[in-house]
Amino acid sequence: MTRAHNFSAGPAALPLPVLESLQGVLTEFEDTQAGLMEISHRSKQFDNVAKTAESRLRSILSIPEDYSVLFLQGGASLQFYMTALNLLGADERGDYLCTGAWSQKAVKEAKRCSASENIWTPEDGVFNRVPAQNDYTLSNDAKYLHYTTNNTIFGTQFGYTPDAGDTPLIADMSSDICSRPVDVSKHAVIYAGAQKNLGPSGVTVVILSPWAVERSRTIGQSRPGGLPSMLDYGLMVDKESLFNTPNTFGIYALERVLNWIETEGGVDAMEKLNDEKAAHLYGALDATDFWTPHAVDGSRSRMNVTWRGPSEELEKKFIAEADAAGMKALKGHRSVGGIRASTYNACSMASVEALVSFMKDFEAKNG
Ligand SMILES: *Cc1c(COP(=O)(O)O)cnc(C)c1O
């Protein structure tokens, strides 16, 4: 078997030991005499999987005990709407820091059911940075502040937790959850689609403060007929994510990834490795005029590194030759072009070293 160096933005590379452990359970899971995907989501064996996944996530991210953890479906994209629906009345607003394509989508969905607005967007419209702390002003009546911790498409990342004062904070952490320590207690809601750092697509992690759960119940009571069941945080908390059939296989894979993170030394070890990978790659980009990094210093993502080549033609050539040499999925997002290397937790330093060495060779031949 040959596994290439995988720089996919998502669904993304998973740790090989995790993938190998998944193979075995397909046909026989523990003492069930059936495969993992063939047993009830209400069986004691699956209950144990879900509980273990939750307790690992709680321990890895130091989630406060009174917070709720949900494993839902619909991706981060459903959370764009669900957060606003559960936390805002129709004429109430959340404030949004608009730092890229996913933030734009988040506020667009929120506007369907609330009076939410962007309060920051780059003046020149170029998403190559995030705002500095307090480089934005919250509106007086904001019920929450929403931000995207890592901008997967543009390759920028918040290096700090925005200070929203007493206003609850909501974070889309889809592309950097568990890549570094985070102060969960400063957030009212954290959500993340699993397919970048945590497992396969089809599972969404949602972390809710007691305020967020209470608020969802109040909003639900204020709406005639209540919230739609599948979109009701309060109900999902009451039913422990088992209101309907969850993605059982996805939750098991997520549990295995969390186990792998623990074995590797938790989020501190992930952060160290991710910093080293990013330093190596940005170092190579900064060392030459041949490449042009997209994100400005201070806003650079340690998960998605984006850059341009000398011409579109050379970018195409680079991506094709890299692919042939076993370095996959380096094409930038269709909305930005250029080159993007996604270096999530499961991407090894060896992969980044291979890429940097290939970049140097390419420059020598084409520079
Ligand atoms: C990938 C991504 C999303 C979309 O996730 P889905 O699970 O496909 O809905 C949202 N936000 C960010 C930051 C992402 O990286």
Image (tube, rainbow, N blue to C red):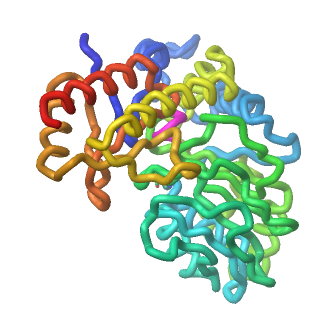
Q: Taking 70 as reference, is 116 above or below it?
A: below
User: On the picture, is 223 further left or further right than 229?
Assistant: right
Q: Taking 214 as reference, is 55 above or below it?
A: above
| Magenta span includes 360 | no
Q: Residue at x 58, y 35 (%)?
A: 41
Quadrant of the rendering where the C terminus is positioned: top left
Residue 167, quarter of picture? bottom right
Picture mark count: 0
Quadrant of the rendering where the N terminus is positioned: top left
Tell me residue 335's x, y (percent): 30, 61
Q: Which residues are magenta?
A: 193-198
Whether residue 338 is visible, yes or no, is yes
Q: Residue at x 14, y 31 (%)?
A: 321
Q: Taking 92 as reference, is 280 above or below it?
A: above
Tell me residue 192's x, y (percent): 57, 48
Q: Residue at x 45, y 63 (%)?
A: 127
User: On the picture, is 133 further left or further right than 214?
Assistant: left
Q: Nearer the viewer, residue 264 or 330?
A: 330
In terms of secondary structure, what is the magenta stretch mainly?
loop
Residue 180, quarter of picture? top right
Q: Nearer the viewer, residue 212 or 345?
A: 345
Q: Nearer the viewer, residue 114 or 216?
A: 114
User: On the picture, is 157 further left or further right than 220?
Assistant: left
Tell me residue 175's x, y (percent): 52, 45
Whether residue 46 is visible, yes or no, is no
Q: Nearer the viewer, residue 258 or 124?
A: 124
User: On the picture, is 309 further left or further right than 225?
Assistant: left
Residue 171, quarter of picture? bottom right
Tell me residue 5's x, y (percent): 32, 23
Q: Residue at x 37, y 38 (%)?
A: 285
Residue at the bottom extreme? 91
